[in-house]
Image: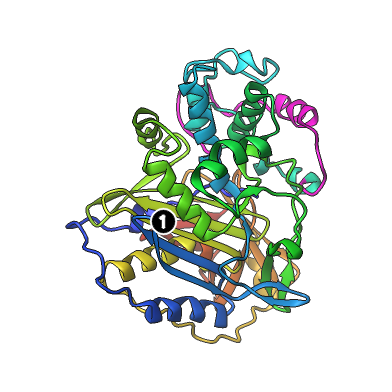
């Protein structure tokens, strides 16, 4: 739930001369990319782009729900996971503008029971420098993610987790930070987060399809999420939205996310000073935003994941272009889709992905042989490879397990993060490839 951001946008968006927008967006080509992903069961969802407040592209692909069957449309609403953090960041900065707190206010002002609360600042929560342990990385998380919890229950649980490092000494992504920030919003406004979101952001930005989520309802045009298995698409478990709160409980559409970005960067939600504060990056983290280059421009973005939903949104201030993608199933990289959308808009080359059919099924003995704990002197984390039935999983230290897709003997991929793992058939090693880099791991 509420996945941490990938590094693909930071590493794959190219530097170069300032791009020029297309005189006429080739919608047919972009449609063909998204339709190819859906046809090959690699991704399903919806994408929207806007320029200077005007929608220039909107396309839905795949299914919003499978039983009863219902095709996705541009009006389909999706859980957006950690994209919610940008909304929470805006709410906190609005309250700072109103002098109800400051970036230097200590967490102990609100929740003294949290470890290091006397030292942790609002600023450190916003830019992931608090050191608070990411509760969604715990193995126990899966056992309660679908059960409702009160704020008091969540705080009691968060208070028992030892911190990962001293506040301010380094950065590490943690959903705990933004769950607490969401609670602070409620304390200072004396209103539920859902009402604050509607009053302070949705109403001001003209968002008709953005709200704090609840139990998924197809009657409200809300999508279910799915994972692809050997038996086809299977429903994902549904998180109870009392748990992610300000870190990941928002529901929206790509078009609404574009409107939100336009309102944010046009000054409808924050002062120029507060917006500039969001864009300041330290150790790779802004305040509820990330930054990456795109062809000579600065691109501000955030992605998210919850259950089987994944989302990605971003804005190019120099070109006034917003893009947002919401998905409810599939392993294809959302970063790659965003890059393709930009390349289409700016008349840059790209190709429609092709997916070679593979009927390769690894032998059970091979899966047993690959299982084990691996380490690399070039990589800071160990990787545990395990077998679950006929599926091979890889799990890095402190992260959730990834279901690997077999490609050929010894070769497995996880397309969502651009990961390729190639096992040596003769010795207990594998080579991990990601983001243009390779690391050799040896079984311990």
- Vertical side of 366 occupied by 197: above or below: above
Q: Is residue 52 left or right of residue 404?
A: left
How is the model colour-coded? rainbow
Q: Is residue 104 at all visible to an observer of this figure?
A: yes
- Vertical side of 290 occupied by 16: above or below: below
Residue 384 horizontal/vertical position (percent): 62, 54
- Residue nearest the viewer, comparing 427 with 242: 242
Q: Is residue 431 at all visible to an observer of this figure?
A: no
Tell me the SS state at disc 1.
helix
Residue 142 horizontal/vertical position (percent): 75, 49
- Residue nearest the viewer, comparing 323 with 12: 323
Q: Is residue 152 magenta?
A: yes
* Label 1, residues with CA under 10 Å away: few <14, some 14-19, many ≥20: some
| Residue sitting farthest toward the left | 17
- Per the image, the residue denoted by label 1 is 8
Residue 45 horizontal/vertical position (percent): 57, 68
Q: Is residue 344 left or right of residue 180?
A: left
- Residue nearest the viewer, comparing 103 with 424: 103
Q: Residue at x 52, y 15 (%)?
A: 105
- Residue nearest the viewer, comparing 355 with 180: 180
Q: Residue at x 80, y 30 (%)?
A: 153
Q: Is residue 181 left or right of residue 280?
A: right
Q: Is residue 114 magenta?
A: no
Q: Is residue 7 left or right of residue 218?
A: left
Q: Residue at x 49, y 20 (%)?
A: 98
Where are the magenta residues, as a range? 145-173
The image shows a total of numbered marks equal to 1
Q: Residue at x 35, y 28 (%)?
A: 273
Residue 237 horizontal/vertical position (percent): 76, 58
Q: Main secondary structure of the magenta part?
A: loop
């Amino acid at each position: 739930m509420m996945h941490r951001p990938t590094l693909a946008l930071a590493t794959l968006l190219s530097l170069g001369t300032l791009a020029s927008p297309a005189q006429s967006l080739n919608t047919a080509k972009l449609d063909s990319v998204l339709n190819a992903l859906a046809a090959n069961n690699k991704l399903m969802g919806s994408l929207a782009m806007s320029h200077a407040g005007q929608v220039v592209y909107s396309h839905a692909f795949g299914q919003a729900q499978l039983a009863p069957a219902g095709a996705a449309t541009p009006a389909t609403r999706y859980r957006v996971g950690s994209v919610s953090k940008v909304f929470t960041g805006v709410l906190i900065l609005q309250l700072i503008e109103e002098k109800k707190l400051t970036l230097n206010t200590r967490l102990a002002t609100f929740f003294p029971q949290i470890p290091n609360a006397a030292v942790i600042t609002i600023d450190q929560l916003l830019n992931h420098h608090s050191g608070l342990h990411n509760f969604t990385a715990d193995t126990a998380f899966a056992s309660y993610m679908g059960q409702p919890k009160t704020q008091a229950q969540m705080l009691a649980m968060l208070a028992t987790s030892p911190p990962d490092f001293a506040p301010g000494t380094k950065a590490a992504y943690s959903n705990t930070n933004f769950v607490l920030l969401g609670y602070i919003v409620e304390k200072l406004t004396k209103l539920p987060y859902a009402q604050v979101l509607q009053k302070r952001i949705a109403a001001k930005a003209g968002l008709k399809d953005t709200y704090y989520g609840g139990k998924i309802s197809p009657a409200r045009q809300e999508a279910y999420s799915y994972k692809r298995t050997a038996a086809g698409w299977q429903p994902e478990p549904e998180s109870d939205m009392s748990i992610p709160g300000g870190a990941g409980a928002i529901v929206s559409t790509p078009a609404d996310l574009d409107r939100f970005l336009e309102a944010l960067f046009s000054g409808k939600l924050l002062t120029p000073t507060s917006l500039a504060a969001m864009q300041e990056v330290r150790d790779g983290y802004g305040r509820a935003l990330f930054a990456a280059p795109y062809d000579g421009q600065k691109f501000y973005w955030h992605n998210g994941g919850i259950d089987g939903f994944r989302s990605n949104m971003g804005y190019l201030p120099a070109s006034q272009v917003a893009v947002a993608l919401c998905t409810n199933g599939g392993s294809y990289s959302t970063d790659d889709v965003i890059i393709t959308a930009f390349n289409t808009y700016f008349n840059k080359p790209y190709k429609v992905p092709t997916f070679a059919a593979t009927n390769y099924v690894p032998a059970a003995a091979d899966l047993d042989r690959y299982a084990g704990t691996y380490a690399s002197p070039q990589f800071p984390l160990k990787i545990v490879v395990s077998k679950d039935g006929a599926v091979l999983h890889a799990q890095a230290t402190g992260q959730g397990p990834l279901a690997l897709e077999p490609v050929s003997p010894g070769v497995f991929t996880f397309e969502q993060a651009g990961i390729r793992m190639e096992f040596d058939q003769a010795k207990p090693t594998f080579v991990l490839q990601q983001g243009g880099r390779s690391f050799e791991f040896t079984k311990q």
